[in-house]
Amino acid sequence: MSTHRTEEAHELATSAVVVGTDGSAAADVAVRWAAQTAAERGRRLLIVHGLDLARTAAVNPYAVVTPAVIDAVRAHGTAVLADAERTAREAAPGVEVRTELVAGHPARTLISLSRRAHLVALGATPDVGALAHLGSTLLAVTAHGSGRIVVVDTGTGQAPRRTGPIVVGVDGSPTSEQAIAAAFTEASERTAPLVAVLAGNDTSFGEFAGEFSVDDQQASDQALLAERLAGWNEKYPDVPVTHRVYPADARQHLQEWSDSAQMVVVGSHGWGGLRGLVLGSTSNWLVQHAHCPVMVAHPVGEDLR
């Protein structure tokens, strides 16, 4: 993607809902969800398809320099975008839609655009596609994007539910503030209740479990959760909040909540070090196995490192 095209795409992404598409059925689900979200919030929709010519070159180093091959790849990308635009307009008539065909690395393109986007949406699919290879692209974008990255998957291929609570995983660390902030915003935008989930083994008290009774542990976790949410309750008095504290296994409980939630929100990482792997593995697992859209919340401006 040229410097001019990069700047143009970044300008289009400012405050927009951005969705990546590879033409797959999973991407179509994400496009519909993103279009409806953009329409509800009065934002424009930017649909992006990556040609990923570098990947084509890796498979066949000579093909990428052949004009006929490049023309065919571009024609396919243009058709994918046209189909996605039609899907978006069917899902949300009247939404402002722009499309961008880019040549850069798929993950890096979406990570870069995420710095200015309202949110970035992706469909979950094991297929290897031009913007996908969503084993690697999805996990790279959810791990390293900025702001709010949403993996739109229901586990059924059906449209995501637009009723039910917003569920947020709270691990007690300062970085979970990003998830809490995003969850309250989503709950307020969607006029939905919020369920805050904390599992005991995600808190620092877990290191000293032998020194606490079960009741002490429960009380400590309840107090920690209430402390983390206190300021947000005041900022969003319109959002009804339910606290749920479990003795262990955040992954299991968040997946169970995904059966009835319209979105699960988690942070990009947890405690750091070994404890970072706990929430990190939870978020990575959820974006592949949850039964509703999963939002991974990052600080704005975080980039691929």
Image: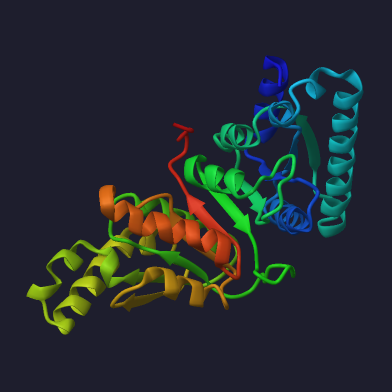
260 or 36, which lies in front? 260
Whether 214 is drawn above or below 132: the answer is below
Left or right: where 150 falls relative to 182: right
The answer to whether any part of residue 241 appears in the image is no
Left or right of 87: which side holds 279?
A: left
What is the number of callouts on the image?
0
Residue 279: image quadrant is bottom left
Q: Quadrant of the C terminus?
A: top left
Question: Residue 190's x, y, as percent?
Answer: 60, 64
Residue at image location 59% in from the left, 53% down from the top: 150
Q: Position of residue 246 (x, y in %)?
A: 32, 77
Q: Residue at x 7, y 74 (%)?
A: 211
Identify which residue, 279 or 230, lies in the foreground.
279
Residue ID at (71%, 58%):
33
Residue 238 in the image: state x and y as whole percent: 48, 67
Q: Is residue 286 positioned above or below 101 on the image?
A: below
> In the rendered view, does 83 fall on the left or right side of 180?
right
Q: Residue at x 85, y 24 (%)?
A: 70
Q: Is residue 191 visible?
A: yes
- Assign the N terminus to one quadrant of the image: top right
Pick the front one: 176 or 22: 22
